[in-house]
Image: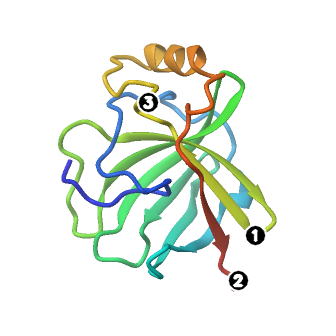
Amino acid sequence: MKKIILLIACGILVGCDYTVPLEKTPSQNIDPALMGLWQRTKPDGQVENLTVLPLGPQEYLVAFPAGSKDAMLARACLCRVADKPLVQLEWIGNERGETVEDGRAFQFAAYTVTGDALTVRMLNTDVVSKNVKTSQELAEAITANKGKPNLFKEETIYSKVKK
């Protein structure tokens, strides 16, 4: 995949991380609190948008950074590993019609919604290797590291944009 600014992350990651999903078929209903337009102001003053829309009863459509010419699009679903609720993102392409070409289409994030604030922490690839080969191996690696404070990267906080 081309090195393009991605997702809702702490320091925002470049490229996609994993070649395997945690869940092949979404099994949890979407969380309505995630829906809508979210934004944050970066330290340089630039505003960054994140859009989360329902794609079905168990999937989301995510655009990041929404509204930009480099916006990436993902299918997302909720999953649970090691008693941690996670969002599984499968990046499918960008606003220019380019698709993921190297097989690294997946990222995983912990999230909380409190009032009008969305806090996101991306799975740390320094703790859970990008080179896992199966969904089972990925789940086992997350479980084995669940007590580590650096299992997820630093948080990024977005505010809900009012209609």
Task: Identify the residue position indicated by label 1 in the image.
Answer: 116
As helix, strand or loop, the secondary structure at mark 2 comes to loop
Identify the disc placed on residue 45.
none
Q: Nearer the viewer, residue 57 or 89?
A: 89
In the image, is residue 163 above or below residue 137? below
Label 2 amino acid? Lys
Task: Identify the residue position indicated by label 3 in the image.
Answer: 21
Residue at horizontal 62 percent and vertical 67 percent from the top: 158
Give the quarter of the figure containing the C terminus.
bottom right
Residue 128 appears at what percent x and percent y? 44, 25
3D distance between C-alphas at marks 2 and 3: 33 Å
Identify the disc placed on residue 162.
2
3D distance between C-alphas at marks 1 and 2: 9 Å
Q: Nearer the viewer, residue 9 or 59?
A: 9
Residue 41 appears at what percent x and percent y? 54, 76
In the image, is residue 3 above or below residue 94? above
Residue 83 appears at what percent x and percent y? 72, 25
Neighbours of disc 3 within 10 Å: few (<14), some (14-19), many (20+): some
Label 3 amino acid? Pro
As helix, strand or loop, the secondary structure at mark 3 comes to loop
